[in-house]
Amino acid sequence: MLPGSPLVELLLIAGGVALLYAGAELLVSGASDLALAVGLKAPTVGVTVVAFATTAPELFVSLLGAVTVSTDIGLGAIVGSNIANIGLVLGISALIRPLDVSDTVFRRHVPFMVLAALLLVGLGWDGRIGLVDGVVLLAALVAFTAAVLRNVQQNQSAITDAQRDEMPDAKARDVAMVVGGIVALVLGSRWLIDGGESLLSAAGFSDIFIGLTVLALGTSLPELAASVVAAARGEAEFSVGNVVGSNIYNVLAVIGIVAVVTPIGVAPSVRGFEFPALLAFTAVIVGMMAYGERITRVDGAALTVGYGVFVYLLLP
């Protein structure tokens, strides 16, 4: 087998999928046990630890793509990944098991997800996301982090002595599972992205198309793997919190950091189709959460079909 041959790329993709599943199992299990040990609620862990861990591939791909290839790849990966998180990740997770939406996530974290989408579209509407825009996004990230830390402190102070005595001790094994899960997710997504990008590049597809499809889907696979595993294990709080947190970090942290490093160009096609699609998917999922405080299987089917239509419309 020659390096770069289609068979090698397909093997990379298969190996990446296997690592993603293993990493998701380790991450969700370890994070769940750690949450119990330190008295954090599952939705908070989903929005913070799990979401930040599954955002690592987006940061890696966007920075690497922006510095070495094209900012189109980084921006396309983020916009496409956030759409995939809502349409595909929550859609498939809800099809497996309806997802209850905690009051904490909806009232305290979802507004930041909406703010992140509005900031991305607003700052990028002039065709460029520069240094000042990046600083604005990072400032919003600081505000989000402060809100999460305040929520964590409130949860900790509400724990009674009796409840604290019943809490299990944090184990080194749980920390090792979380770290091992993160490493497997990042490596697995990297293998899958490398394989898919090489196949599409050889077929002559553009950077922005690769970013919005293969890279976006590839970098969303950690979220998909973690959320599907969480839903299957009956821990749906992780699924919703993971997507909300990931969509926040993708824009505020990843785009913010990339824009500070190098200006990001926003193509007219992105402003004309991808930005409106991101706002539409964000509005739909917020409406679904508000209507019944859960994402039903019908909602999941609608989201999945909607994502399929989005990808179809992207085809050249």
Image (spheres, grey):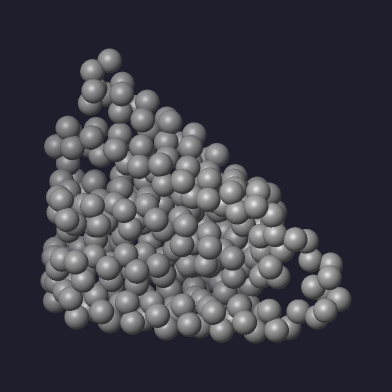
The one nearer the camera, 163 or 80, is 163
Vertical placement of 119 versus 221: above or below?
Answer: below
The N terminus lies in which quarter of the figure? top left
Q: Nearer the viewer, residue 315 or 259?
A: 259
Which of 119 and 294 lies nearest the eye of the viewer?
A: 119
- Residue 203 or residue 168, whichever sits in front: 168
- Using residue 95 as the reference point, say whether residue 64 is left or right of it: left
Residue 248: image quadrant is bottom left
Q: How many marks?
A: 0
Residue 48 appears at what percent x and percent y? 52, 67
> In the image, what residue occupies the spot 73% across and 83% down?
158
Residue visible at 18% across and 76% down in the picture = 131
Q: Quadrant of the C terminus?
A: top left
Asked if residue 94 can be seen in this view, the reply is no
Q: Residue furthest right?
A: 162
Q: Is residue 185 left or right of residue 120?
A: right
Please give the name of the residue rendered at 84% of the width and 70% of the height, measured from the top-left corner.
165
Q: Residue furthest top?
A: 1
Residue positioned 13% across, 71% down in the render:
127
Q: Residue 16 at what x, y percent from top left? A: 42, 36
The image quarter in which residue 13 lies = top left
State whether residue 11 appears in this view.
yes
Quadrant in which residue 141 is drawn: bottom left
Spot occupied by residue 312 in the image (x, y as percentages of width and height): 30, 48
Q: Is residue 69 left or right of residue 19?
A: left
> Residue 170 placed where, x, y %?
70, 59
> Could you tell whether 77 is left or right of 186 in the image?
left
